[in-house]
Amino acid sequence: MNHAGPTPVSTLGAIPIAAVLAALRGRGLWIELGAAVLRVQGDAPGLVAQLQSVYRCHPFLTQSGWADLHVRIERPHGLRRWLRPQVVFESDGRVPFEPFPADTALPLLEWGTNWLIGQRLNHLLLLHSGVVERGGRTMVLPAMPGSGKSTLTAALSLSGWRLLSDEFGAFDPVERMFRAVLKPVALKNASIEVIRRFAPEAHLGPEFPKTRKGTVAHLAADEEAVRRRHESAAPGAIVLPRWQAGSPTRLEPLAPQSVFGAIAFNAFNYKVLGAVGFDAVVHLVRTCPAYQLIYSDLADAIARLDELWARLP
Amino acid sequence: MPSFACVPGTRVEAMGDLWAAFSPASGETLLLNDTSVAILELLSEGAMPLPAIVERLARDVARPEGEIETLLRDHWPKIIEAGLVCVVGQASPER
Amino acid sequence: MTASTGKVVTQLAWLGAIREPREALAWSLADWERVVRVARRLRLLARLAESLESAGLLEQVPVEPRQHLIAEQRLSRFRIAAMQWALDRIRAVIDDPAVTLVLLKGAAYLGQGLPIAAGRMPSDVDILVPLDQLADVRARLLAAHWAHTELDEHDQRYYEQWSHEVPPLVHAVHPIELDLHHNILPPTARTKVDASLLLARLRPSRWPAWQVFDPVDQVLHSAAHLFYDSEIRDRVRDLVDLDGLFRHFGARASFWDELPARARELGLVEPLALAVHFCVEWLGTPVPDGVRGALVDGGLARSRRRWLVPMLGTILMPQEPDERSSWQRGAASWLFLARYHRWRMPWHILLPHLARKARLRAGLSPER
């Protein structure tokens, strides 16, 4: 028996599948996202392998004193168990969505959990953006349609930037720091192949071809991002990405009045936070230089951002 | 003649060329230009009836009163609906 | 009955912290985890948060649940502000001293600044106008960009003929739905309330132009709403509201004298008896000696009490967070809904209405 210290916790990816299955069918699996703890239970077929793939570096936890979100992904009773089988997302006695086909348990878990986070975590200002960190400062990438935000966030996380989240810019208005909501990066359609080519060694989970948003696959958060999931980070800069076919990389400063809307009106819970949200956005816009990034070559864009970071005041 | 006042707790912050304004009454955030902010600034000194607002504003920005009146007629409903300005005596319900 | 009542009280013991927030400081993290989940579903979490904050105790709550309390508090304050703003704009639109505008339920509690106003989670605003002013008020609201959600001809007729309210109104700017009533109970129901009796005893609220029912009528409305509504789940909050109303208005001795007589006058004796029974048994609401016995014994026939009270007890008891629905709850739910539908509409209207709803749900066309 080793008395040298606490037993190191294994990661979800390294644990035998039977142990994970037992946890999901029993009291549950606790997944630490940083700003929130997610507890998952359920008998959805295939979910075990999917979780082990896209949460591979997260610690394997079968007990904890606290969870913020309690989710069940299950097969419903009745006919739908066999005929065109489905899975259902349930949390605290409520079923907020229509069932999904049973072979898309992971997308259901991911989208459903994102919905819960957007609804519940109102002690934080939740921007709709990717957030990565380098040298103790964060880069916020607001999500606009067609921006390629997820692709860029994924690529940055594979290029020496620490991932905090691909969906939520979780800003603590009291501490004035960003917190991680560390979930796998959701890639859609063409982005999947782009990231595969960009980083062939990257750990992509299974592809789900027929979801409402097309084909979806998830990039697992790496070991360093998971290890530092509890570390908050100071605001650095705001970069609005715009992918444009054939365009050379351009990084153009943006005036505050253009950025305010991109941050505030795009957030999940800006209105709910009232004056607190207003003050937080004013602070962010005033302390962070803002840019529009127009690009077509991912590697070149990242090189430009690396350069920007070296010059950051 | 009704008087207009700034809704208490309204926040106005400079944002580059524009201003961000927050109304605690309506929960709305608006991006305003200088004219609208000038109106709010005027009313923050005290409640005023509409003709007085027109007169002071015309003087402050050195433009003819007729022009200011037209400008106000365009902006006024939006500013009231956004909860930045209210009619005195019909102020937002106390909490 | 006594044995099951004992269990009931323990399961709901956490509700005491809303009135005595100091009790929450004794909770373990596991206790907190359960309370956060149940209270949020019951729309009581913000109420707890406001109680703790008023008592200066929020900082002593462990950080994990504290974040949820703060988050829910923000959501509550946002919704309350949205409700107030919508009411302010409606008043500005109507702008006519000849129109009688009455606040109902949560809006009324807010408009009077009652203790149960803090921490509410309104999703809609309930107001009432006299039947003869309804068309006019509705027209003015529609002209001010309030709009009915998409309704077909049958649903329109349902509301017009068989309901005490017009279809819900929504507005592009206001995040909250408006429910415009002309009575507190549907005209087709077995229990009919004469709205003019309620309108004869209106009181001013703290808000200009808005009035509220007499306190006794507010309590009776709340009791009627609790026991004559079709929503099965998570009704304990309404009981907590009733407890709050009894405590606040009941401080005045004359309230208890007026209450039974008015209940008889409005035909709401049974809901009042049920309200008093559950409030006293479950929440320890202080009701003067003699009044309680008279109300409950006088209001509930023994035969009805035997099946009605246990059924309602099963319905009202909130489900624990990881609890799966029991057969008892399922059976009680079925009974509750059957009772509601039978009460709500006469058979000759109800059956075609339900058949139509079933066809719609099955994806068939509404007409045969």
Image (spheres, rainbow, N blue to C red):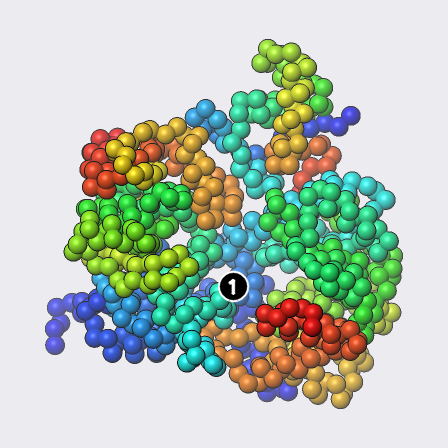
Q: Foreground residue, C225 or A215? A: A215
Bin the neighbour count of mark 1 within 10 Å (Cα to Cα): few under 14, some 14-19, many 20 and up: some
Q: Amino acid at mark 1?
A: Arg
* Residue C347 in sight here: yes
Q: Which residue is mark 1?
A: C40
Residue drawn at point x = 57 percent, y = 42 percent: B27
Assign a secondary structure to mark 1.
helix
Residue drawn at point x = 24 percent, y = 47 percent: A155
Which part of the image, by quadrant, shows the N terminus of chain C?
bottom right
Q: C137 left or right of A303? A: right
The location of residue C195, given as percent across then percent down, is 84, 61
Q: A130 left or right of C224? A: left
Location of residue C50 (image quadrant): bottom right
Residue drawn at point x = 21 percent, y = 53 percent: A196
* Residue A232 in sight here: no
Q: A106 left or right of C235? A: left
Task: Identify whether C334 is placed above or below C77.
Answer: below
The location of residue C236, given as percent across then percent down, is 61, 70
The location of residue C192, given as percent across then percent down, is 83, 69
Task: Identify whether A242 is placed above or below C184.
Answer: above
Q: Foreground residue, A45 or A211? A: A211
Residue drawn at point x = 70 percent, y = 18 percent: B52
The location of residue C244, given as percent across then percent down, is 66, 63
What is the total number of numbered labels drawn onto the structure image? Answer: 1
Kindly identify which chain the residue marked by label 1 belongs to: C
Location of residue A312 (image quadrant): top left
Which part of the image, by quadrant, shows the C terminus of chain C?
bottom right
